[in-house]
Image (spheres, rainbow, N blue to C red):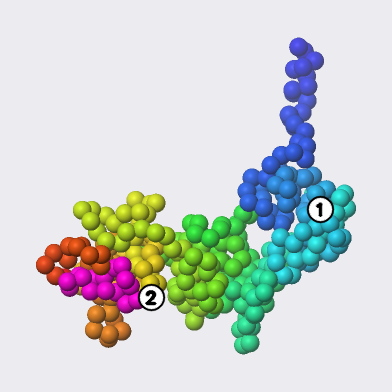
Amino acid sequence: MAALAGLVVAGCYAPKIGDKLKCNGTYVPGMGDCPDGFHCEGDGLCHKGAFVPGSAGSGGHAGAAVGGGGAGGHNDGGAGATAGASGSGGAPVEAGTDTGPPVCINIPVSGCTADTAGKKCDPVCQVGCGCTQKCSLNTAGALTCNAPYALRPKGLGEGCNPSSVGKDSQTDDCMPGLVCMMDACGSRCYRFCKSDADCPLSTCSRNAGGGFKVCDVQSMTCNPVKNNGMPTGCPGEAQGCFVIPNGTDTTLCDCPGAGSPGTQCTFSRDCFPGLVCVDVGGTGTGTCKPACSLAPGATDCGAGTCTAIKNSVKFGYCPN
């Protein structure tokens, strides 16, 4: 017992960690939470030593955009990523001794036609910035090239936090290609887009400022008509169901605004749940109106008539 006590007093307990510990987070080359002296690789495990861009360690994963090497890797990053070595190539460097190139997070989007003429960078294609930076937009509508500040950047639709708001140094904790924007829910990561083709199950219709747009929230089947309470079909209790403008009966679930009947609006989500934003007189200004069903026999408008929303065969609006 005395010998054991002596061991306890002589030094701190330092258990041995092998290469079987899972990374705490979604894999991003060189990122992911691992103990000191270890790094996360594409197999989702913590490997000993610092991450070396362009090498595959023991798993044969894809290298970063500045990487190089053998034919055994696979391209996880689209255009700009290069294959890593296979098998046991690319031995890791011990922590604190890595003098190689920085870890690249800015990997150009495959097949994306970049537009950088007169611009600092392209936030959709993710070109024009340094490899440790992402092309984004600040709240003043100016393009920026800064590194996201989070170890594990947030994904699409996740809550986020910006820093240095309105400055050239503005950044956030969203992944490259995404930007942190305020909305009725608080702040979420939105995807930059140029057309609807960049937005699966969504539309390129949300204004990000500076002439740039982001994808709207993804569409979801729900009921936008108020029927003895809140519209139904949305996963969140605080969310409302709304008709997408010109979406031909496409609906989405989003955090509602505070517009009451008769209030001016741009989108239906600017209104309370159960309302729809319509430009009744074609003046270019929308007004919140009660949503109604165009189904035969529906009586959502009481004695009034349910008038079809533009391009809709399912939903309309009541006069009052």
Q: Is residue 145 left or right of residue 226?
A: right
Up the image or down, 11 lies above or below 214; here it is: above
Residue 221 pos. (x, y %): 39, 59
Residue 313 pos. (x, y %): 32, 71
The answer to which of 64 and 133 lies nearer the viewer is 64
Residue at screen point 63% across, 69% down:
134
Secondary structure of the residue carrying numbered label 2: loop
Residue 156 pos. (x, y %): 53, 60
Residue at screen point 32% across, 77% down:
310
**Among all residues in the image, which is located at the extreme bottom?**
118
The answer to if 145 sits in the magenta stretch is: no
Q: Which residues are magenta?
A: 305-319
The answer to if 308 sits in the magenta stretch is: yes
Q: Earlier in the sequence, mark 1 or mark 2?
A: 1
Between the C-alphas of marks 1 and 2, the distance is: 47 Å
Residue at screen point 78% across, 22% down:
7
What residue would you read off at disc 1?
Answer: 60
Residue 38 pos. (x, y %): 75, 46
User: Is residue 55 shown to the viewer in this render?
Assistant: no
User: Is residue 247 shown to the viewer in this render?
Assistant: yes
Q: Is residue 162 left or right of residue 70?
A: left
The answer to which of 147 and 157 lies nearer the viewer is 157
**Quadrant in which the N terminus is drawn:** top right
- Three-letter residue code for mark 2: Asn
Q: Is residue 265 left or right of residue 148?
A: left
Q: Looking at the rendering, which quadrant does residue 232 occupy?
A: bottom left
- Residue 246 circle label: 2
The answer to which of 260 and 187 lies nearer the viewer is 260
Residue at screen point 78% across, 37% down:
18
